[in-house]
Image: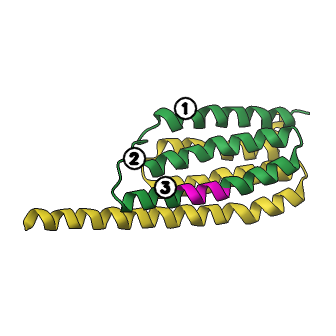
Amino acid sequence: MAFLDFINISTVSAAVSLIGAAGIILLPKPVDKVIMFTLLEGGFLGMIVAAKYLDVAVAAAILDPISTVILLIAVIKINDVRKEKLKAQEEMNIA
Amino acid sequence: MLDIYVWFYTGCALMILGSIATVIGPGVKDPVIRTLNTEVAAVGVSMIFLTYNHTIALLTFVASTLIITMILLRAIVRLEEMEAKV
């Protein structure tokens, strides 16, 4: 079982973060990108834990979801702004 | 001691991929998508800080990335509201 040597917390975290990075780069919709960003941060957190810096892991675990929430709020707000702009433009075209 | 190399090479890969994706990735006409792509490079830099045991730098970098993302997205939404040409 030589390949089981490769399954430790570092390699699994590296795989998770690479999957998250590929998802962020390749998926077109912003909400999908935010979900994949959470995956990337999860892999990064696993790497910090593998380095045994648990105090840094506590701080990163608090700060990362805040970043996700901010991104989600921004995506929702910019969707609203664009929809309203489109509506205003249509009304101007009709009138 | 394979672990350190795993962190370092993953960080380098994320940094290079994120930088290229920020410049010529799919759909970067949209400023939100471009800002989201820069996060990949930021996480790569954090992993390299982790390799060299710079914990204080890592903490500060994560916090400042959060704040700068907040400000950038606020500015993007504001510019979109004002219908400015970015």
Residue at 63%, 54% (x, y): give it: B68
Chain label for disc 1 = B
Residue at 85%, 57% (x, y): give it: A56
For residue A94, above or below residue A29? below
> Which mark lies nearer to you, 1 or 3?
1
Which amino acid, mark 1? Ile
Q: Exactly how many numbered labels are in the figure?
A: 3
Q: State yes or no: discs 1 and 2 in contact (Cβ < 8 Å).
A: no
- Find residue B83 and report its horizontal and vertical position in percent: 33, 57
Which amino acid, mark 3? Asp
Q: Which residue is mark 2?
A: B86
Which numbered tag is attached to residue B20? 1
Using the rendered image of the protein, determine whether residue B30 is visible from the camera's viewpoint. yes
Colour of chain B in the image: green
**Distance of label 1 from label 3 (alpha carbons):** 20 Å
Q: Residues within 10 Å of mark 2 (few under 14, many from 20)?
A: few
Q: Residues within 10 Å of mark 3 (few under 14, many from 20)?
A: few
- Find residue A34 and report its horizontal and vertical position in percent: 54, 56
Q: Which residue is mark 3?
A: A32
- In the rendered image, what is the letter of the chain coloured yellow? A
Which amino acid, mark 2? Val
Using the rendered image of the protein, determine whether residue A11 is visible from the camera's viewpoint. no
Which numbered tag is attached to residue A76? none
**Distance of label 2 from label 3 (alpha carbons):** 24 Å
Q: Which residues are magenta?
A: B66-72
> Which mark lies nearer to you, 2 or 3?
2
Residue at 24%, 62% (x, y): give it: A86
Q: Within the image, what quadrant is residue B14 found in?
A: top right
**Which label's residue is closer to the chain start, 1 or 2?**
1
Decide whether the magenta segment is chiefly helix, strand or loop.
helix
Image coloring type: by chain
Chain label for disc 3 = A
